[in-house]
Image (cartoon, rainbow, N blue to C red):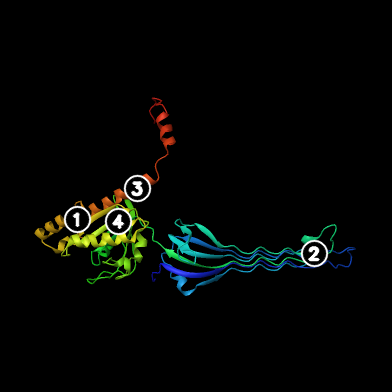
Amino acid sequence: MKFLDQARISIKSGPGGAGAVSFRREKYIEFGGPDGGDGGKGGDVWAEAVDNLNTLIDYRYQQHFKAEIGMHGMGRNRTGRHGKDVVLKVPVGTQIFEEDNETLIADLTEPGQRVRLARGGNGGFGNAHFKSSTNQAPRHANPGQDAVERTIWLRLKLIADAGLVGLPNAGKSTFLATVTRAKPKIADYPFTTLTPNLGVARIDNREFVIADIPGLIEGAHEGVGIGDRFLGHVERTRVLLHLVSAQEEDVATAYKTVRGEIEAYEHGLADKPEILALSQTDTVDEETLAEKAEALAAVAGRQPIQISSATNHNLDTVQRALMDEIVGQRERDNPPDKDDRWEKAAVPDSGVAES
């Protein structure tokens, strides 16, 4: 399945059905009267986040969605049938924007979350609705309300716990393939990864989701290379794993290049916790490795974790570092209820041992 993370579509709700003008004409009823029914309501257009999707590719081949119109009212006080709704199934993590692609309408971050994008028109009243003591034979009815038509943008931002960043060929895809069951494309040339990949890592009986995005190069925020478009897929992560390859001639410059692009991207990405790793350590000798680790520590202000996906060296260490940061942030975002802790502390010990 091809990956598509942005789509422009047109939606239109259903117009309401018109009310009917009708009168009873029955042989054995002495007095007739108005019996025109109301029109049915037009269908709505909804967006719903679902679990089993991870791309917007369906919206490349169909860009126009119309809900069903409400049926007109009929005689004998029959109300028209309501129009059927249209539900747009989108992946979890999809943001919906107005036509300007800047005004946010909704951010669907939970499975089953729904938002109404266009409300169907109400049905018009039939002439039976207008009957009164002073107007016992009304000969008019209301038309249905018009439909709502708009153009919207769908933009997918993957939901992951940790994001991988680095220059092309820093070993991000190899790391993802080694610690998860994901199968990204791996080769010895730059920009092997052209679209984001997700994988689920497991360490110490705990799981977390990792997102791998195409590599960044100098000038990515200005569109150089693949650009920084895919950085949006690590906006929702709790921690970044910055990989710097030991094969780089100048690891300090490599680190500063990626950090510069992250800071130029803004959106709070530069403020996320970052774990630094010196990757592909199996490709250089120990003396060179020590020099590069020292140079990287000097520019970053902390010691990098030396890893090798080929030999599994220190992969558990870096996964535990990621998991600890993720768990810590989860606890900060969802602290235990103070009242519950007070209640547990307030219960006196009965002194009776449980059997």
Say which residue label 4 marks.
240
Q: Is residue 154 visible?
A: yes
- Spatial separation of the CA atoms under disc 3 and disc 4: 13 Å
Mark found first going from the N terminus, 1 or 3: 1
Say which residue label 3 marks.
329
Say which residue label 2 marks.
35
Residue in the image at 22% along x and 56% along y: 277
Secondary structure under tag 3 reads helix
Residue 73: image x %, image y %? 72, 67
Foreground: disc 2 or disc 4: 4
Secondary structure under tag 2 reads loop
Which quarter of the rendered picture does the C terminus lie within?
Answer: top left
Marks 4 and 2: in contact by CB < 8 Å?
Answer: no
Is 206 in front, or is 281? 281
Residue 190: image x %, image y %? 25, 71
Mark found first going from the N terminus, 4 or 1: 4
Figure quadrant of residue 202: bottom left
Q: Name the amino acid, label 1.
A: Val
Foreground: disc 4 or disc 1: 1
Residue in the image at 16% along x and 60% along y: 281
Query: In the image, which disc is placed on residue 46?
Result: none
In this rendering, the answer to whether 134 lies above or below 65 is above
Figure quadrant of residue 31: bottom right
In this rendering, position of residue 107 left or right of residue 166 = right
Q: Name the amino acid, label 2.
A: Asp
Query: In the image, which disc is placed on residue 299?
Result: 1
